[in-house]
Image: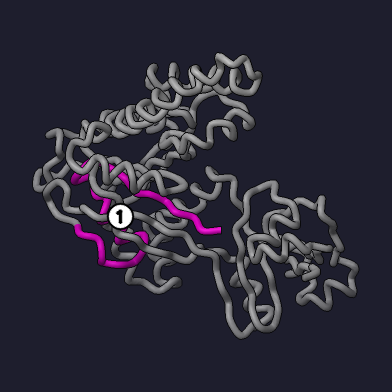
Amino acid sequence: MSLKIGIVGLPNVGKSTIFNALVGAKSAQAANYPFCTIDPNVGVVEVPDERLEALTNLIKPEQTIPTTIEFVDIAGLVEGASKGEGLGNKFLSHIRECDAIVQVLRGFDDSNIVHVYGDIDPKRDREVIDMELILADMQTVEKRLQKAQSEAKSNDKEKVIYAELVQKVNDQLAAGKLVGEMDLSLDERIIIKDLHLLTIKPHLYIINVTEDKITGIDREEYATKLGLQDSSKIIPISARIEEELAGFTKEEAKEYLADIGIEETGLNEVIKSAYSALDLITYFTAGPKEVRAWTVLKGSTAPEGAGVIHTDFQKGFVKAEVITYSDYVTAGSEQAAKEKGLLRIEGKEYVVQDGDIMHFRFTS
C-alpha cells in the first residue's frame, strides 16, 4: 500500500529545507519569502529496515525491494486559508490527499529569516494551522449536517444515528477540537469516513531547531508547551544536520550521529512515527529472486496481506506459509527453518504479524 505524508507549516519555518533533507533532494524551493512553494514538491524515499538488510545478506537475492513512503511538501499556509486566503484552497486540496500530516514548527531564532508573525511561538503556529484545518472541516460537516438532519426525519435508525454523529462532530469542531482527538469509537470513525475530514488524519510535529539545541529537547516538556497530550508526536529535527547527513554514506551518518549524541536520522524518526500513528506494520516475502518488504494495516488477516501484493492473491487465497523474522534469522535459511519445524501453515483467520516472512498459496 502506498503511503503519503504531507509536510505543512507556516511560511519561513524551514519546511522545504526539511523536505529536501528528508528526501535527499534539492528539488523543493526554499527562500526567505512566503509562498515560495506553490505547487507541492513530491519525494519518494525507501523505508529503512534493518530486517530487510539482514534477510538480503542471508539470502543474497537477485534484487531487494524496500517499501516506500511519499513525502509531499505543501505550500506554506497563512491564517484565513480555509476562506481561500493566500494559497489556501490549493493547500487544503493537497493535504486532503495525504494519509498523515506532519507540521513543521519553528523552534529556532534567526534575524535573517523573517517569521510571518514577527516572533517565534511554536504553540501559536500550531494553533493557526490546526484552526485552519478545523474551519475547513466545519464547512464540510455543516453542509453534510443539513442533509443528514433532513434524512433523519424519516426515522430510519441508521440515518438518525448518522445525523447525531455528524452533529456531535460539528459541536466538537466548533469547540476547537481536531476530529482525530475526539472520543469516537472505531465504528463511528468508519461511519464518518465519507466526509474525508482533514483533522481526522494523524498529526505529527517536527520541531525545527538549531544544531546546538537538538540533543537538549525534552519531548514531554515540549508537548506540554504545545498543548499536546502525546509526546510521541514530537520529533525534534535540525534541518542543517539533516542536510549534512544527506551527503553521507550510511556508515558515515551513523558515526556522525553518534558523535553528536543522536540515535537516528530525522527521516527514520518521521517514518517510524508515521507508521505507528497510522497503525502500519511490515511483512516480507523472501526467495532467491527477490526479497521484498510490504506494508499492511496492523490487524490485517493473511488474505488481506496477500491482497497487498495482488487482488487475485486475496480472492483465491488458500493458505500462507509463515516464518517469524527471528526464527528465520536464527535458522539461517528457509530450508533450515522448515527442518526445525519453524515454518507454520496458516489459514484465512491468521493475523499478519510485524516481521513475518510469508509465502501465499492461492488458486487462480
Residue at 26 percent of width and 65 percent of height: 27
Q: Which residue of the protein is positioned furthest toward the bottom in this rendering? A: 62
- Compared with 341, 3 (above or below) is above
> 299 or 81: which is nearer to us?
81
Q: Quadrant of the C terminus?
A: bottom right
Quick one: SS at disc 1?
helix
Answer with left or right where residue 279 lies relative to residue 364: left
Packing grade of label 1 (10 A; few <14, some 14-19, many >=20) is many
> 233 or 191: which is nearer to us?
191
Residue range of the region highlighted in magenta in the rendering: 1-29
Please name the amino acid that badge 1 sits on: Ile
Image position, residue 164 (x, y; %)? 55, 17
Residue, disc 1:
18
Image position, residue 156 (x, y; %)? 64, 19
Residue at 28 percent of width and 52 percent of height: 211
Q: Quadrant of the N terminus?
A: bottom right
Give the colouring mode of the picture. one colour
